[in-house]
Image: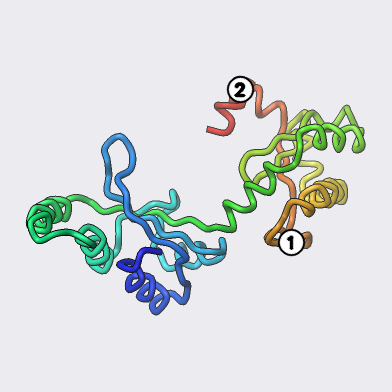
Amino acid sequence: MAPHFTELAGRIFKNYAVMPINICFSFEGTKREPTLKICFKYEHEVRICEKQRLLNCQNRTKAPNLDYWSAIRKHMFSKQSLLSGIVLTFRFLSLRRRTLWTSYSSYEAFAKAETNDSIPSDRLEKLKKEIGQEDLLWTISRAGAATIFFLFTKEQVTQYERSDLHKDWSNRYYELLKPYDEFGYYKQEDFWVNLDSKENFDNNYQSNWYYYYK
């Protein structure tokens, strides 16, 4: 973490009892919106922020106080000459009139996604064959940290959601994950694969993976 953001990290810890592991500032999107990115180690720390209404449901919200602007000013003025500092003063005052956005993330979420992606595709095919039940299980898909077992119909999803069979599938997939879970973020007692249906995939997403995961 850059030194000019450590004071802000300390304020976040003081107010919400969660300590960021990194803070950075950038301009995001086609509109080049000023955005402060705050990263925590664990997902539950992001959830704490959500409970404190630091975030909205899109995990992106207007920055709640002037402490953020103060940190950004230090970031802009770090290691600058006097002349460039004068120019930056005008730039900062212009920037200050815009909406500052904040986005929150966790290293845990990134590590989980990387772990899940590390499983070779042929192991997924092998698992599907080991499970059998070709009249029930259509395919296994994954995106990020999420893994989805696709059944054929919505009725099947309703029938097997949180069933013993669902838990058996989750346990089997967990065994695939563990060798790649370097930091031990996945916990078997809390782990479930998601269920969805080919019926939903075909009818609502035009049988297109891009639309489904968009």
- The vertical placement of 29 against 68, above or below, is above
Front-most of residues 7 and 186: 7
Residue most toward the bottom? 14
Number of callouts in the render? 2
Determine the residue positioned at 75% across, 41% down: 119
Determine the residue positioned at 9% across, 61% down: 82
- Residue 197 point in image, percent of width and height: 72, 32
Front-most of residues 115 and 43: 115
Measure the alpha-carbon separation of dots 1 and 2. Answer: 31 Å
- The residue carrying mark 2 is 208
Q: Circle 2: is it few (<14), some (14-19), or many (20+) Cα within 10 Å?
A: few
Give the mark nearest the N terminus, 1 or 2.
1
Q: Quadrant of residue 144?
A: top right
- The vertical placement of 79 against 177, above or below, is below
Q: Circle 1: is it few (<14), some (14-19), or many (20+) Cα within 10 Å?
A: few
Helix, strand or loop at mark 1: loop
Amino acid at the residue labelled 2: Asn
> Which marked residue is nearer to the observer: mark 1 or mark 2?
1
Relative horizontal placement of residue 123, taking residue 48 as reference (left or right)? right
- The residue carrying mark 1 is 187
Q: Quadrant of residue 43?
A: bottom right
Helix, strand or loop at mark 2: loop
Residue most toward the top? 206
Relative horizontal placement of residue 80, taking residue 113 as reference (left or right)? left
Determine the residue positioned at 39% across, 79% down: 14
Amino acid at the residue labelled 1: Lys
- Residue 139 point in image, percent of width and height: 77, 30
Relative horizontal placement of residue 101, taking residue 131 as reference (left or right)? left
Front-most of residues 35 and 114: 114
Which mark is on residue 36?
none
- Residue 2 point in image, percent of width and height: 36, 64
Q: Quadrant of the N terminus?
A: bottom left
